[in-house]
Image (cartoon, grey):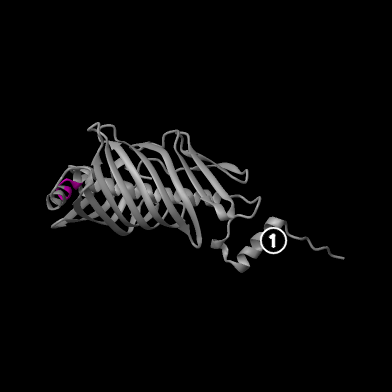
Amino acid sequence: MTHSVLPSRATRASIVCLLVFAAPACGPAEGEDESVDVEQALDAFDVSQNEAALVVASIARLDPKSANPDLAALKAAATAGLVFRPTDCVTTSRKDNTVKYLLSGCLGPFKTAKLDGTLDVVYSVGASGLHALASARDLHASRAILDIDSEGFFSLDADGVTRRLEVETSGEGQGPRGHRIERAGAYTVTWNATEKCATFEGDFETRVGTRAFHTAVSGFARCSGECPAAGGEIVHEKTDLGIHIRITFDGSAEASWSSSRGLHGRIPLFCAAGS
């Protein structure tokens, strides 16, 4: 006589989810590992980090008070080799206030990734200062792939040293862990050109397949070629599924995470220079 073994409640929930909704629409069943959600949150952030570095690169040598977008584009094109390294990794072409950057194995500001592909930037001037409208398709940043549609607003803080870039963004990207992410939101990058360190604060609506999350980044800081400093965090949540995940950085090459369901763990970061 044979005895059938019934699957666990969590397994049964996963089977129903696969049959009825298809896998991307389903969150982890109760008791299951939520590490996939953690990976997706970090991939969404890594795509944003690399995009931020590209937008910073496009304005790094410019005067935030520039009143002539054509001259801003001219200077950006002429100084690209001082921003992207090595110098011969980038070629530029300019027409009026638009610059096309062709990148081949470049390291940009903060050494976040090796960059390969084409970036187009349109410069303009508004009440808030110099603007840079950046777009790219299938641009590779080491393990990540970026589709970019973003507009950065460049200014100088009251101390006269700290530079600030406020970016409104939308687009897609594949993070270094292989998840395809859609993002829409805003972030702010501040940096001191002498210290080569940057801070990042952001707020996004992110989507993976049919699953939508709200992702917020606060207190994130990183110096050129180093792992994130201790103290930053990412909160990744979907209230209708009861999912709330917090990822924290401690200065090492791993991040810690915990979920509203009581699960927790650690996950490696891609934070070496050129990673």
| Magenta stretch holds residue 192 | no
Q: How many marks?
A: 1
Residue placed furthest toward the right: 1
Residue 54 can be seen, yes or no: yes
* Residue under pointer 1: 12
**Could you tell me residue 244's position as x and y percent?**
55, 47
Camera-side residue of 31 and 244: 244
**Could you tell me residue 156's position as x and y percent?**
24, 38
Query: Which residue corresponds to the image point at 33% horizontal and 57% vertical from the top-left?
Result: 148
Query: Which residue corresponds to the image point at 39% horizontal and 51% vertical from the top-left?
Result: 47
Question: Relative to 178, does residue 165 appear above or below in the rendering?
Answer: above
Q: Amino acid at mark 1?
A: Arg
User: What kind of element bears circle 1?
Assistant: helix
**Could you tell me residue 41's position as x and y percent?**
48, 49
For this view, does 29 lie left or right of residue 217?
right
Query: Which residue corresponds to the image point at 25% horizontal and 31% vertical from the top-left?
Result: 159
Residue 85 can be seen, yes or no: no
| Magenta stretch holds residue 79 | yes
**Could you tell me residue 243's position as x and y percent?**
57, 50
Magenta span: predominant SS is helix
For this view, does 117 lie left or right of residue 49?
left
Span colored in magenta:
76-80
Which quadrant is home to the N terminus?
A: bottom right
Which quadrant is home to the C terminus?
A: top left
Query: Which residue corresponds to the image point at 45% horizontal and 55% vertical from the top-left?
Result: 206
Question: Relative to 222, does residue 106 appear above or below in the rendering?
Answer: below
Packing grade of label 1 (10 A; few <14, some 14-19, many >=20) is few
Camera-side residue of 156 and 16: 156
For this view, does 72 lie left or right of residue 118?
left
